[in-house]
Amino acid sequence: MTIKDLAAKTGYAVGTISRALNGHPHVSEKARKAILEAARESGFQLNTNAKQLKQTHSTTILAVVKGIGNELFGEMVETIQNHIAQTRYQLLVDYLDEDSNEVTRAVQLCRERKPLGIIFLGGNTDNFLRDFAAIDLPCVVVTHDASSLPFANLSSVTTDDLQATRSAIDTLISMGHSRIAIIGGNRQLSDTSRLRYEGCMQAFASHGIPFDSERDYQGVRYSYQDGYRAVQTLLDGGCTFTAIFASADVMAIGAIRALWDHGLRVPEDVSVMGVDGLPLGSFLVPQLATVVQDAAKLAQQSVAILLEAIEQGCPARHEIVPFVIARRESIRDITQGEAKPCAKAEF
């Protein structure tokens, strides 16, 4: 099939077809969607230009980062860059909004930049199931378990999000908290948000503690600002709690500020716990209790697996990197009414 065939099939001009396939901005979303869908249904592959055809060797490794403000991914990108810099390859980093389709963006960049392999930082199962078949390069998705997906060229390195959040809620419950509000992400768009929510629900169920998701859960974006706004919404809605669990440290930090602005002290009035283990959390007052993900190991393993696949043709691998519960100063034991000392962070 040619571009002219696509033009005949969709009714759009050849120039419009070309611009849509090449990601040109001057195409309406309606036209772009129709053209890309027609191309996908027809198995159409865009021919690269003559200059690209002459490039028989590429040294580019692509990193597609889902979440412009995701500080954990920022840490990982730095580690990935350091490791790639010690090889003959060069790293191209592309940032997307957390609600964007990371796979279709990667497909577009494969046409334009011809990478040898791709590291996805963040991913959504539906996006991979729908669109990943168009990619035949070795790929690794980080912080997302792809072991159940039917792609022989897709590896994954992740933390067990469900067990991590279940352990976090178990920790808060063991310290006497039964009224726990949760700040999480969009469970429909983010597998990480969904798994972290399910982990929380499993913990509540195992302890026989009811949870009203309409009242006690706020699904927001992963940012300081949205963590702040989530607490405002919870308080304005009459939600009462002795602890807040946030699905990311940035949300937890925003939540602490919002509590302070409402005259509530952490941890004297409300305990707060996050996920990620960002270095910033160790320097806050109080130090942020969190589920520590090993960002360095996640990044290192993703690079190692990808290079093995590129250079040795190794099959896909799926690894789970352990997490650690860091009991720090932002949570307190209320079983006896007084705060018990929490472990100090290591710098």
Image: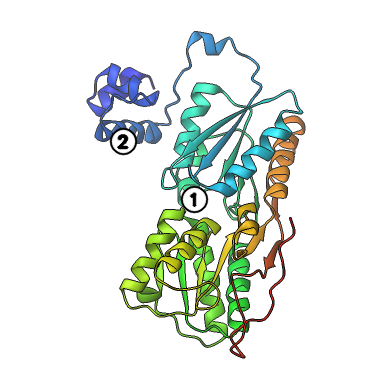
Q: Name the residue under label 1.
A: 124
- Residue in view at x 58 percent, y 45 percent: 73
Question: Is 182 on the left-hand or right-hand side of 308?
Answer: left
Q: Report which quarter residue 34 is drawn in.
A: top left
- Residue in view at x 33 percent, y 78 percent: 238
Give the Cα distance between marks 2 and 1.
Answer: 19 Å
Q: Which of 197 and 113 is in front in this view?
A: 197
Is mark 2 in CB contact (under 8 Å) with mark 1?
Answer: no
- Residue in view at x 42 percent, y 64 percent: 258
Q: Which mark is residue 33?
A: 2
Q: Is residue 98 above or below residue 173?
A: above
Label 2 Cα neighbours within 10 Å, binned few <14 / some 14-19 / many ≥20: few
Question: Is 299 on the left-hand or right-hand side of 215?
Answer: right
- Can residue 160 be seen? yes
The C terminus lies in quadrant = bottom right
Q: Report which quarter residue 39 is drawn in.
A: top left
The tag earlier along the polypeptide, 2 or 1, is: 2
The residue sitting at the bottom extreme is 336
Q: Which of 187 and 114 is in front in this view?
A: 187
